[in-house]
Image (cartoon, coloured by chain):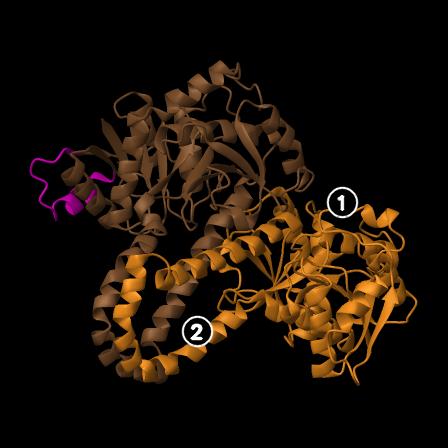
Chain colours: A brown, B orange
Amino acid sequence: MKIVLDAMGGDHAPQLVVDGAVQAAREWGTEIILVGQEGVVRAELAKHDTTGLSLSVVHASEVVTMEEHTMAVKGKKDSSLVVGMRLVKEGQADAFASAGNSGAVLAAAIFGLGRIRGIARPALASVYAAAPGLCLLLDIGANADCTPEYLLQFAIMGDAYARKLLGIERPRIGIVSNGEEEDKGSMLVRETYPLLKASELNFVGNVEGKDIGRGLADVVVTDGMTGNVIIKLTEGLVSFLARFFKRQFTGGWLNKLALVLMIPGLIVALPGLVLMLPAVGELRRRMDWREFGGAPLLGVDGVVVIGHGRSDAKAIKNMIRAAQTAVQQDVVGTIKEELARRGMDRRGSAA
Amino acid sequence: MKIVLDAMGGDHAPQLVVDGAVQAAREWGTEIILVGQEGVVRAELAKHDTTGLSLSVVHASEVVTMEEHTMAVKGKKDSSLVVGMRLVKEGQADAFASAGNSGAVLAAAIFGLGRIRGIARPALASVYAAAPGLCLLLDIGANADCTPEYLLQFAIMGDAYARKLLGIERPRIGIVSNGEEEDKGSMLVRETYPLLKASELNFVGNVEGKDIGRGLADVVVTDGMTGNVIIKLTEGLVSFLARFFKRQFTGGWLNKLALVLMIPGLIVALPGLVLMLPAVGELRRRMDWREFGGAPLLGVDGVVVIGHGRSDAKAIKNMIRAAQTAVQQDVVGTIKEELARRGMDRRGSAA
């Protein structure tokens, strides 16, 4: 299996992207094709010991920056995004992963790989982890405006993904709303409700903000704006709380004094603290987006994973793993089968 | 000043509602009219020492339950909601407060008090506190579907409220979106953007989920579904984290053992802990919705505050205070002046 990695994508590209690629190749023996400006990428690779690793470089002279408009990919035919997608399209690689400009990756994926027959719009999916139960949330930003048909398709794709990658036999499907009752929600939600109800999916109804990830549903669909707000709000809130407690231990003279006064006590309490730390560490890991590495773009005809712009080497490594697993589990094939089974595999059927 | 309190509204009505009313009357000398089934309300009042307090009861034979449809108020002319709104309409009281069925309170307010001229839809506003900077978020649930005109009106009302009640001279106004750039967001957001930009408001642009309450804007507008998801997601996340840490200290034999092992250390660390606790307590208070008591319903022609269904006595007390302050600061008058100044004070102008 070969994974194409956009060496130029992300706030820390190419340095940490190459670093993450080297780690993935070393740890899992993954074959990685780094696409980007060859000189720059090779210079980064030279900083690592890559003996025995399967890391190749494919040149792409142009770069789509994080600030550029989505449609910049149209004009940049020799960008890492366009060249990388072509490698997948031509069967020279099995998946594409990038921590770059997500709108541009989405556009490049649609132009380069095309949509799966029957899917009007691809959706970005993310595992929502800041809660007691994991759940798959989609769309988290590919489509700010959606129709009930899009949301139904998201649900079908999310269902396939959850079965294959989360190992849930019959995923419970929910839809984000502002109330549990069937008549609650925006017009979009109220019009999607009967479609989901009539589908063969295991639809469990509306899911309120407070219940996302509380184990009521395994897959939760929403429009890309609401999904994006959910993901980013969670990120902001968790980082605010983490900063608050950190400041409690380090900021200001009063807090510093408190910490100094606590030192003897903490030493005495050490055995108890040691017993408690694993669970706190476990929570921290679970809520760390770098563990998941990236969000799969479901609905394009090929495996594409989009990472956080702020990805470090660890996040890049995990993004590569996410792409690898999606290939192994044949997520694209499963979505296609599912659509065919439902007679929905027609081009433009719900566009 | 007289505040009408819906004695029958909320999960813990009438018991904790009456309890909260007694506390408010005692603490601030507020004159409170309890509206509800007289026998039941008087029986609750009898449990308290109300000597010298200004607490009266107005009978309303019917009750709109938490589960009933919004429109139930239409059929229940003698419910606490309808009777209570009438007292405000007729000038016998200055404000109405309820922790009951929020959709029904909204409907009763619109039917009973009417909308302010120029306001197409009233909005529920809430102070978002789970962040470094407080900000006013609206709409948090009154209108699942909105138009750009509604959002502009929400911004004007939020601006007036923030000036009067939060004491911010020139509030910065933002709109929730899935990206900072002007071209990001749903069609609703993209169509609202130029209206806000053209207004005389201090519009600062799009606010992403991660930046809500991060001090970029003092007033953030959004449609009622997104706003509701934001408020409830925050509530769910904070309570999940609180439960997690609580469980760390109390749940399971390993955690209990850890706690026992830590006791001597905690005793030694006491001086430091004591120095740290105020800030943690402060954060806890800030993020406690019961401190704010209720969300003002802006845009109806009278002061209406809606509390959380789960309100306890403390929340009810603070809801009464919120209503009282809104009357003192003449929020309704300020909104009217603002609309008149802009020539927007026409009935149905943007409906």
Q: Mark 1 lies on which chain?
A: B
Q: Residue at x 65, y 58 (%)?
A: B197
Q: Which residue lies furthest to the left in this view?
A: A51
Q: Is mark 1 on a helix, strand or loop?
A: loop
- Based on the picture, tell me whether residue A41 belongs to the magenta stretch: yes
Residue linked to disc 1: B69
Q: Which stretch did the figure color magenta? A: A36-55
User: Is residue B100 found left or right of A138 in the rendered image?
Assistant: right
Task: Provide residue B291's location: percent of width, then percent of height.
Answer: 60, 71
Q: Do tags 2 and 1 sit on the same chain?
A: yes
- Based on the picture, tell me whether residue B259 belongs to the magenta stretch: no
Q: Which chain carries label 2?
A: B
- Where's the N terminus of chain B, which quadrant? bottom right
Q: Dot 2, crowdedness within 10 Å: few (<14), some or many (≥20)?
A: few
Of the pair B196 and A305, the residue shown nearer to us: A305
Rendered position, B201 above or below B104: below
Residue linked to disc 2: B280
For the residues marked 2 and 1, what is the alpha-carbon distance in whole angstroms?
40 Å
Task: Provide residue A237's location: percent of width, then percent of height.
Answer: 46, 59
